[in-house]
Image (tube, rainbow, N blue to C red):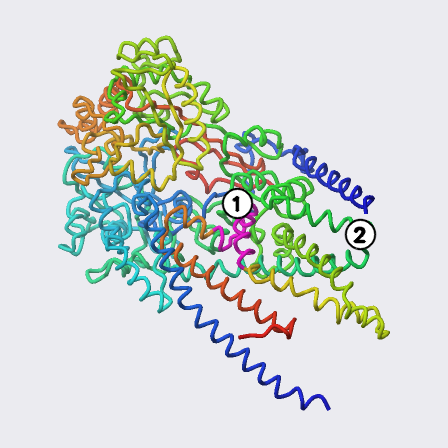
Amino acid sequence: MRVHQRTGRALVAVLAALMLVATACTPSSPATSPAPSAAASAAEKPQEGGRIISGSLSDIATMQPVLVNDTASGEATAMLYDVLITADAKTGEPKPGLATFSASADGLSYTFEINAKANWSDGKPIIGQDYLTGVMAVGKSAKTVRKSTFQDVQGFNDFKDGKATTVSGIQIDAANPKKFTVKMASVTCPALLSIANNRYTLPTQVFGKYVTATSKPEDIDNAPENTNPTVSSGPYKFKEWRKGDQVIFSKNETYWQGAPHTDEYVIKVVANQAALTAGLKTGELTYSTIAARDLADMQTVDTVAITKYPSLGYSWIGWNTQSTAIALADKRVRQALAYGLDMDAVIKSVVFGEAIAHVAHHVPVQWAYPADTSALNPYKYDKAKAQQLLTDAGWVKGADGILAKDGKKFSLTLSTNSGNTTNETIAQVAADQYKQLGIDAQAKPEAFQGLVTKLTTGDKTLEATIIAWSLGSEPDPYTIWHSSQIPDPATQKTGFGFTYFKDPAMDKAIEEARNPSNGDCSVAARKKQYDTFNKILNENQPYNFGFVPNTIAVAQKSLQGFAPAPFSTLYNVQEWWIKK
Amino acid sequence: MRAPARAPSRTVEASRLRTFILKRLIYAIPTLIGVSIITFVIVRLAPGDPIRLYTFGARDITSEDIDALRHVYGLDKPIPLQYVDWLVKAIHLDFGQSFIYHQDAAQLFVQYIPNTLVLALVALALQLLIGVPLGVLAALRRGTWLDGVVRVFGVVGHAVPGFWLGLVLILVFAVQLRWLPSQGMLTVGHDVWDFPDRLRHLILPAFVLSLTGIANYSRILRTETLDVLSQDFVRTAHAKGLRERTVIFVHALRNALIPVVTALGGILAALIGGALVIETVFSWPGLGRFTFQAAIAKDYPIIQAGTMISALLLIVSYLLRDIAYAIVDPRIKTG
């Protein structure tokens, strides 16, 4: 018996050792020979055929643009429906897509003309009526979250409320069905991208029957073509959706910008980051974006090419300027919290150096970002300065080393969404650093579901919150920073003004860039307003603006023409090809 | 001669079994209603408003539109009323529409259930086909190296966390050796009926999911067989001059299997529960992962339907266990 026990122990040891070796293994260079770099692709003649497999961390929810509310579904509809006006992939500035555009001198109307070559995949021309169908679908739908997109279009609200059978502000040219005009109720600079940089140009031959005078909201919301689209204006057509696993698209041979080189485009659902990196290593996935923590690992794989670029968004710490902890109401305290947090150290430990410190709302890739950054205080890490500002604000260290004022200790709870390792690490690192300033700081992860409700309904027990914003090509910050967006539980008003910070000059700048009194929606005019806006935020620090992380895209070296940029990855998907 | 004597008793037994099954099915109704009420209340009392969560990314949405959405899903009604609405529809097998997918919850589940069942049943088969013989062999070869291996495996198989083993196996067999796919149920581009391809995808997840069970069953079977082998009736059987094989398979094994049947009761539910982890590690498009994601998104109709399906599976698997009891051990009376 004893002998067997010994054998048993030895076996356990061997097994354990084997497993340790297995986990410790670094990926060796795979058998496949390294493919030429993406740069070489420009000169080569694209090869036809093959399949692009994109890794996605979640399944798509729908293929009805009107109902889309998540990234994966956005990717799917990008295959199927083209936009009238695109945002330049690198600069975010509007440029012609499916249509060319012009604005009237008074800024109250936009005229679009759809490309003469542009047809639906069933051969019918894409016309102004198709845009009207899409806008009416948004008006009819009870489940869309995008009704406000068209609220400034004349007649939209009447249609939405059932007072009209069409949207009077959308007028189709009698002589040219591809030409139409959209009339606005007021001059609104974000309007162009809002009304035209979307996928609501829908095939009337398919969806027209769901938006008639007698149609009910559920007609469009439950349309079978939402999950089984039959006609496409984009580079690919829908083929099959295997729920929870993959969505398969086949090439649209008659695509107006030229048929794509690959036969298929597949969105493959992977359950987690580890599966994503494994799939990229084995070649089961053609491309995806990865987390910064997997970068070092991916760099050892010589079959993939890595592209890094700054994201269109930032991770921030929002201070509740009306906190019951009072300390945060004082601008000097918030500035001290900026000087007192070594953002470079945060970036190193949170995203392994793959980010840049950020000190304003707009991010560097947006045109609204100040050209002259010297106007912005970089809040370079300076512990002494932080301590001085706290002293100026009346906070002095007590015997226990904790700052106190009027007998009240400086405590600070940094709330964030649990399960998000990036945000949780920021909270932890920030709490550690603030402790060194004499602040009794604690990180508090809580379920995102609860946190979102608290934030948007104005629960003032939250002192500091760490979340990230992803921004868009239209830089209008109204919904985040205008004082009208501050939630108020007393009046049940909800909104994204979580910091309760308001400033009349900032409101004015936001309004002038949104609805200019002189009607000037030029980039130059708006930029001036945003310079003021960013400077006020930078000075007042309602957020610690945290950092702008890099997006890390990984693709097989065999994928050619792949050139992701901050505003779009898929803008040239029809030009991608697989080198055999 | 014996046949006529047994015939009436078999009929009696069969009708008794029928009554038993019917009774259990009737008892299942209040159980399901209880489960539905508890789930309904808990998901709604947990912090966080599903509509706020859903609209968090839509920054332009107005408060009125948020209220309108809440009304569409009936979330503006008092919870008891919402429950009555749900129950009336559920009786007609209408479990409502997913907030996220805008599709009927029942229809969505129908697409995920087969995937999980395939995984769970293959794992169950592996557990029984590997675990049972291993345990019996270990008992018969007690004290040999084989016994040692089985016993060590009994401990290790239990102790190794599935998600970790899954990741290790992916690294070794998919990333390093390239023998097996790293994830999913089917290679992209392959037909859903491509059986060999599906099998290749099943190997790793089914093995990991079955590991605990194999360890469990081999351990139980080893102990039970040893126990049974030392009992009087086995000695009697030997003494009667029966062949070794007859003694083991007809007399000993049948008795040793009873605890396995006990363990089988919760196994289907346990496998489906365990499948959540395995489905996540191997990106398997199954029920567990789908329900889990719905729970994160507070997609009430899906959570509710998922809980009902799990409860039903548990009830059915306990019922099957009791029927199996009656077959394996005639002494256990149904009723």
Alpha-carbon neighbours of circle 2 within 10 Å: few (<14), some, or many (≥20)?
some
From the viewer's perspective, tell me whether residue A252 is left or right of residue A338: right
Of all chains, the one bearing label 1 is: A
Front residue of A191/B271: it is B271
Pointer 1 local density, CA inside 10 Å: few below 14, some 14–19, many at least 20: many
Kind of residue indicated by mark 2:
Leu
The x, y position of residue A150, in whole percent, is 22, 44
What span is in magenta? Answer: B269-289
Residue B331 falls in image quadrant: bottom right
Cα separation between marks 2 and 1: 46 Å
Q: Residue at x 67, y 41 (%)?
A: B172
Closer to the camera in the image, B128 or A317: B128
The residue that label 2 is drawn on is: B146
Front residue of B29/A387: it is B29
Q: Quadrant of residue A92?
A: top left
Instruction: Tell me which residue sits at (52%, 30%) in the image.
Output: A293
Magenta: main secondary structure equals: helix
Specify the amino acid type for callout 1.
Ile
Residue A408 percent across, percent down from the top left: 28, 19
As helix, strand or loop, the secondary structure at mark 2 comes to: helix
Asked whether the residues under the numbered discs 2 and 1 touch, taking CB atoms below 8 Å apart as contact, a structural biologist would say no
Q: Which residue is located at x 62 percent, y 85 percent?
A: B9
User: Vertical placement of A319 versus A136: above or below?
Assistant: above
Answer yes or no: are tags 2 and 1 on the same subunit: no
Mark 1 lies on residue: A53
